Image (spheres, rainbow, N blue to C red):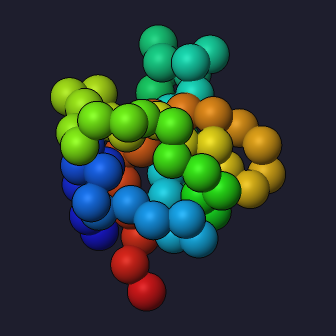
Amino acid sequence: MSDGRKRDNIAPGDTVGIVQKKDQRNGSITEGRVREILTRSGSHPHGIKVRLVEGPVGRVRYVKRE
């Protein structure tokens, strides 16, 4: 698994675990495939923000490599 704080580690189609804004307090992770990367900078200390194919938006905690 790769770190979700660097944009270079994430690409559309990757399976990732994200934390949505509504789940920040409890840390609940939603897993899905990346549709688009929303963060423009190369890195972010809380994770790169992405939109999943299924619709949710959140910050990446991990990237699954297969």
* Residue 28 appears in the figure: no
Which residue does the image show at 74% across and 56% down from the upper left? 53
Extreme residue in the bottom direction: 66
* Residue 47 appears in the figure: yes
Picture coordinates of residue 9, whole percent (x, y)? 29, 62
Which residue does the image show at 78% across and 43% down from the upper left? 55
Query: Toward which corner of the image does residue 56 lie, by quadrant?
Result: top right
Which residue does the image show at 38% across and 78% down from the upper left? 65
Picture coordinates of residue 17, whole percent (x, y)? 49, 51
Extreme residue in the front direction: 40
> Between 17 and 58, which is closer to the camera in this rendering?
58
Picture coordinates of residue 7, whole percent (x, y)? 30, 51
Which quadrant is the N terminus positioned in? bottom left
Picture coordinates of residue 8, whole percent (x, y)? 27, 60
Query: Toward which corner of the image does residue 44 lie, by quadrant?
Result: top left
Which residue does the image show at 57% across and 28% down from the upper left? 20
